[in-house]
């Protein structure tokens, strides 16, 4: 089979790789229907994380089950399935607490931007749809593999609920998904910080009530104007840079919460936040915990998180999918074998 | 009148001071019935915080209203009242969110270990009891001025709810109050980390289900034995030192929460906690938000937070009250004029 392999910053190649095989009785092999490129893949692409050797890449997918190990009972060959960017057993004490991203027997994949994928812990990871979904639903189902669940996780981690005021820092695919999550969770004010017209449009479609184009102190001042002068109940930090974290800290009210999902590349002044009673929570998203509910919302066409994909390419053009996101020509690239 | 003044580390004196007077129409003057010494007062007593000049000290009190300013309507002369260690207007947008410790017009007092106290923002700070309470309830009512509400705040900040497993780091008066709070909020497992027999007894009376005497890695291992091997849902960090924070981080499960109320004198590895999805929240307690409910529980004799006081002295012996706590001869000292 063929799949994407990252060799060096800026160098992603579509190469022949060994077909994945069942290694454990709990494995499934999935034939990819759609995969995509994540903002976190760009950290390596941009040379911000080491690439010690050529490495299969990608961690978002949906597809058709091809074969399953002897112990797999929840899915069968022919099922259309989606799974999260980390596999999980869904049975260990940590999973039973809903913290599937930290499953004691979980982990990642060997490159999902590929024609076939080995999914460990298939029973605790994959969810099958009833029948094969309509083709126009594929992007939204694929979005549940990471980006939509990560935006949801930011909102849940920040304690968004009915009536909350919410600021979303970051207008990438995760930030936009955070806007959708906040609106779905009942927030009455959803402020998207964005200076790109195309992303503002998606944010509005997802339920943003306000767009703030200013950044830094001006952006904070605009947010305070919209939140009784005190800042927002909840801030979703969906970038991970120092600038984004400063923005998040400035936009949250005393007693409020910051939901963190941007990969941390900056510090947080936790002792200063103490005096303002600001909470911080976040990390990798517990996809398996959120997947059943969000898949229902997608299949019933209540939400359309697939709107974050504004470029679709054949999997063989994975290099261009990376380049388009790196150069900000695309919010997020979808790939089909 | 007389009151306590701290002159230097280890040097607290009972001195004549000017009687407080109404300065703003929203003020009340309260004649102290009981006051006490806080663990946070000891930071200055031990030379860990500067004392630029002789300073009236103390911030916990209950008493009888003597006079009120023209704008005060919620309490009247003769009322028995309790107020929090920070005053608050209870009307600003931040107070309306329940974050009274961060009230936009709030602040501290000019020394509450004194015969009389000026209480700014009386309407938004003081709560009157129905009649003068029985004398044996005074310690528990006084405890609501800070220590009990601070323990409650730790538990609320850590998200303690029905069925939670909770570890309390710190067996001082705040930690013990955290045990009581966790039990009241429905925790099914409440682990008090304590190596002092007298404090263990109070912890058990407050609802601790387990006592862990070990510290460091051994303590963490014991906690994991009691929590399915993964750590506790919620950890209340009621000390503020580096050691206590390390203990808290080690005892919390992935996806769990740390409630911080120990004054921060140590760092937190927030980027490491990100990968474990551990939340952190806390700060000065929103006393006015918690006071009505907790006062009901005290007056109905449902809870007895006054058990944290194991030394009672005349206010004139305030120096000994400090020394006893500093030398760990007392958990917490109560003072009566």
Image (tube, coloured by chain):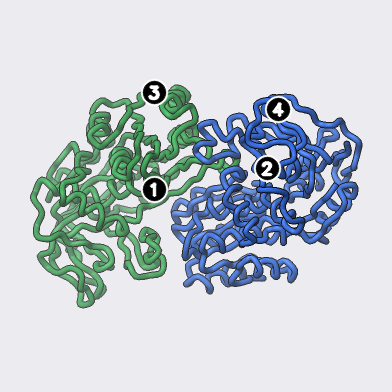
Chain colours: A blue, B green
Give the Cα distance between marks 3 and 2. Answer: 42 Å
- Labelled pair 1, 2 in contact (Cβ < 8 Å): no
Give the Cα distance between marks 4 and 1. Answer: 67 Å
What residue is disc 2 on? A83
What residue is disc 3 on? B214
Q: Residues within 10 Å of mark 1 (few under 14, many from 20)?
A: few
Residue B123 coordinates in the image, percent (x, y): 25, 68
Chain letter belonging to callout 3: B
Q: Residues within 10 Å of mark 3 (few under 14, many from 20)?
A: some
Give the Cα distance between marks 4 and 2. Answer: 17 Å
Q: Nearer the viewer, residue B261 or A287?
A: A287
Would residue A231 be found to the left or right of residue A177 on screen?
left
Q: Which of the two marks, 3 or 2, is nearer to us in this view?
A: 2
Would residue A325 be found to the left or right of residue A182 on screen?
right
Q: Residue at x 17, y 60 (%)?
A: B81
Dot 4 falls on a residue whose secondary structure is loop
Q: Which of the two marks, 4 or 1, is nearer to us in this view?
A: 4
What residue is disc 1 on? B50
Give the Cα distance between marks 3 and 1. Answer: 33 Å
Do the residues at pointers 3 and 2 share their chain?
no
Do the residues at pointers 1 and 2 share their chain?
no
Dot 1 falls on a residue whose secondary structure is loop
Chain letter belonging to callout 2: A
Q: Which of the two marks, 3 or 4, is nearer to us in this view?
A: 4
Residue B289 coordinates in the image, percent (x, y): 32, 58
């Amino acid at each position: 089979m063929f799949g994407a392999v990252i060799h060096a910053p800026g160098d992603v190649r579509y190469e022949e790789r060994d077909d994945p095989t069942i290694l454990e009785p709990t494995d499934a092999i999935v034939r990819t229907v759609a995969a995509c490129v994540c903002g976190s893949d760009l950290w390596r692409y941009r040379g911000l994380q080491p690439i010690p050797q050529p490495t299969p890449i990608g961690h978002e997918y949906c597809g058709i089950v091809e074969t399953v190990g002897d112990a797999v009972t929840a899915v069968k060959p022919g099922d259309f399935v989606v799974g999260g960017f980390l596999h999980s057993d869904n049975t260990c004490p940590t999973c039973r607490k809903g913290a599937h991203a930290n499953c004691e027997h979980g982990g990642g994949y060997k490159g999902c931007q590929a024609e076939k994928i080995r999914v460990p812990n298939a029973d605790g990871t994959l969810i099958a749809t009833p029948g094969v979904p309509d083709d126009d639903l594929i992007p939204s189902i694929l979005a549940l593999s990471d980006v939509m669940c990560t935006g949801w996780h930011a909102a849940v981690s920040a304690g968004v609920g009915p009536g909350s005021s919410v600021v979303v820092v970051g207008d990438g695919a995760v930030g936009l998904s955070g806007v959708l999550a906040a609106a779905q969770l009942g927030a009455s004010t959803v402020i998207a910080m964005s200076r790109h017209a195309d992303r503002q449009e998606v944010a509005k479609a997802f339920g943003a009530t306000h767009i703030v184009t200013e950044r830094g102190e001006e952006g904070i001042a605009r947010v305070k104007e919209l939140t009784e002068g005190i800042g927002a109940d909840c801030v979703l930090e969906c970038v991970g840079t120092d600038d984004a974290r400063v923005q998040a800290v400035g936009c949250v009210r005393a007693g409020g919460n910051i939901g963190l999902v941007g990969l941390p590349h900056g510090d947080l002044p936790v002792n200063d936040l103490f005096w303002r009673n600001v909470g911080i929570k976040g990390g990798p998203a517990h996809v398996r915990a959120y997947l059943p509910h969000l898949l229902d919302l997608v299949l019933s066409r209540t939400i359309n998180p697939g709107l974050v994909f504004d470029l679709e390419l054949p999997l063989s053009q994975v290099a261009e999918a990376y380049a388009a996101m790196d150069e900000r020509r695309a919010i997020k690239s979808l790939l089909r074998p």
